[in-house]
Amino acid sequence: MANKRIAYVVNHVAFFVSHRLPLAIGARHSGFGVRLLTGQAGSQEMELVAQAQLQTAGVEHQRAIFSSAGMNPLVELLGVLQLVYFMLRYKPDVVHCASPKGMLYGGIAARLCGVRGLVLAISGMGYAYTQGAGQGRARVFVRRVYGALARFAFHHPNVHVIVQNQDDYQSVIENGLVDAGRVTLIPGSGVDLSLFEGCNSAHKARMILLPARMLKDKGVIEFVEAARQLKDVAPEWRFVLAGAAGYNNPSAIGLAQLQAWQTEGCIEWLGHVDDMTPLFREAAIVCLPSYREGMPKALLEAAAAGCAVVTTDVTGCREAVEPGVTGDLVQARDSGSLAKALLSLIEDEQRQQSYGAKGQERAKAIFSVASVVSQTLNIYDGVLRHE
């Protein structure tokens, strides 16, 4: 694969650094020239940190005008045309697209440019495919437009699709987007297991951590309501939110609301945290009551760190745990059932430790970043050999 070029297309730099940078480094070590093409930042705070990491890694980057939550048709069209221009100049042999708009716009641009091989990684379907309160018509409209354009991208003559959960695997095939032979299920973007060496589920703090961007769709409101219910019965436990606010997303929770919750005393909000590893090493329980995911990296890191997990029984989240073995599943958008599940774990230290230990075993077996990189490089090799 020497002297080949690959272009990664994602929504923004922060996502690429957190979920795909090890893969790009692995591709470079395998002989690829590497370039990153993105849209605009979702969070300026997260983007600045990620750009510094990108520069340290030596990955070239070009930015188009589209954004994750952008709805202006002219701006979005210009963003696609910019991607076409970038690809025509760079001439990649393979284009690997991830994140909702990165996958859609990058896939369209790759087809228009006649790129030899296209890899589409479904890592969650984004705002349009997350059923939340309000703005239902907007979501349905965006979903329809997205679906129509996605068919054009997926019908590249030499495409391979990566999915992270069984629901998306079935959906891609049943909707006729690609044949089963062109789909590979890889559970998540991988975890650097070396970061969590020495973690012991028996030596954890009384902390329940929600690690996510501050979005309603991540179940932040349900987490806060559950914390309110539990503060009096478990006053020694900390309920901690770790993630950026001010995110460009219709589901974003405002800064004033987060500060009000913190003033109330039911939760602690840490804001964006550059390095989440110490928090995962400390937390006894990690909670992600999300409405939909691909395969949330935060839950894979929680498993690697020996944390018990409570998450929702929805696409992506349900496959990140083994129910009753590494964590518990609850109904989405139900703060009462969430509080009940958390209290059950709080009161059962032995089960906390058992979930954490079993989670570590599972992370070592199937969630290592080395395995993800190896499987993906094999996919690159396959599309390059495809006639």
Image (cartoon, rainbow, N blue to C red):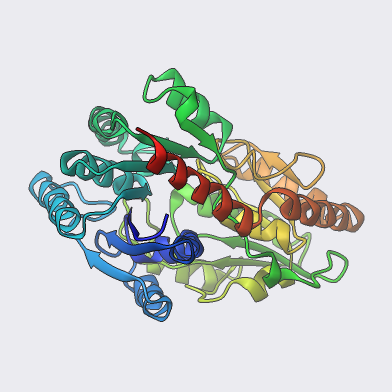
Q: Where is residue 353, by image quadrant?
A: bottom right
Q: Position of residue 272 (x, y in %)?
A: 47, 72
Q: Does residue 132 appear in this view?
A: no
Q: Is residue 98 toward the left or the right of residue 288 in the image?
A: left
Residue 377, relative to residue 237: is it above or below? Answer: above
Q: Compare residues 80 and 248 and report the one nearer the observer.
A: 80
- Image quarter in which the N terminus is found: bottom left
Query: Residue 170's spot in the image, x, y percent?
Result: 51, 24
Q: Residue at horizontal 78%, vertical 47%? A: 326
Q: Residue at x 40, y 73 (%)?
A: 50
Residue 173 placement, left or right of 311: left
**Does residue 89 appear in the picture of this structure?**
yes
161 over 97 or under it: above or below? above
Determine the residue positioned at 26% across, 47% down.
106
Q: Left or right: 375 with respect to 130?
A: right
Which quadrant would the C terminus be assigned to in this image?
Answer: top left
Quarter occupied by residue 186: top right
In this view of the protein, which residue sits in the foreground, 48 or 104?
104
* Of residues 47 and 179, the one drawn nearer to the viewer in this rendering: 179
Percent x, y of residue 318: 64, 38
* Residue furthest to the right: 350
